Amino acid sequence: MAEKVDPDDLIGAADVQAILSLSHPSSVTTYLKRYADFPKPVVDLSGSRVRLWRRQDIVQWRTQREAMS
């Protein structure tokens, strides 16, 4: 059974960009390719370019990366 996701916790690339202080939302795709541990989207409709992440996954990833610095 799949984990239930609260729709209010879902964010798009622009929000991921803001949380990670990236220069552009398209940088999120670069992070997906560059970092094997980068959170995978919980919704990925590649035909329509829609990708959604859980906010807490992105915040946790950022926190872990900052702790390693």
Image (spheres, rainbow, N blue to C red):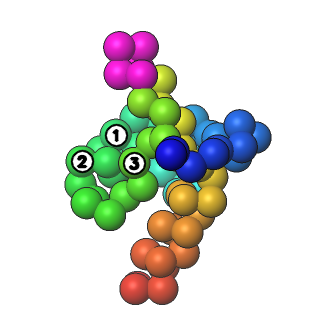
Residue projecting furthest to the right: 8
Q: Which residues are magenta?
A: 45-49
* Category of crowding for the residue at label 1, using alpha-carbon neighbours closer than 10 angstroms: few (below 14), some (14–19), many (at least 20): few
- The answer to whether residue 27 is above or below residue 61 is above
Q: Of marks 3 and 2, which one's residue comes earlier in the chain?
A: 2
Q: Badges 3 and 1: C-beta atoms under 8 Å apart?
A: no
- Marks 1 and 2, how far apart at CA: 6 Å
Q: Badges 1 and 2: C-beta atoms under 8 Å apart?
A: yes
Residue at label 3?
A: 40
Residue at label 2?
A: 33
- As drawn, the label of residue 29 is 1
- The answer to whether residue 33 is above or below residue 67 is above
Q: Please say whether residue 23 is one of the residues in the magenta stretch.
A: no
Q: Secondary structure at mark 2?
A: helix
Q: Quadrant of the C terminus?
A: bottom left
- Marks 3 and 2, how far apart at CA: 10 Å
- The answer to whether residue 55 is above or below residue 28 is below
Q: Position of residue 65 (x, y in %)?
A: 43, 75
**What residue lies at 71% left-to-right and 37% top-to-bottom?**
7
Q: Secondary structure at mark 3?
A: loop
Question: Secondary structure of the magenta portion, mostly?
Answer: loop
Q: Of marks 3 and 1, which one's residue comes earlier in the chain?
A: 1
Q: Position of residue 15 (x, y in %)?
A: 61, 43
- As drawn, the label of residue 8 is none
Q: Please say whether residue 48 is one of the residues in the magenta stretch.
A: yes
Q: Amino acid at mark 2?
A: Lys
> From this viewpoint, is residue 18 visible?
no
Q: Which is nearer the eye, 37 or 23?
A: 37
**What residue lies at 54% left-to-right and 75% top-to-bottom?**
63
Image-based side of 62 in relation to 7, left or right? left
Q: Which is nearer the eye, 21 or 54?
A: 54
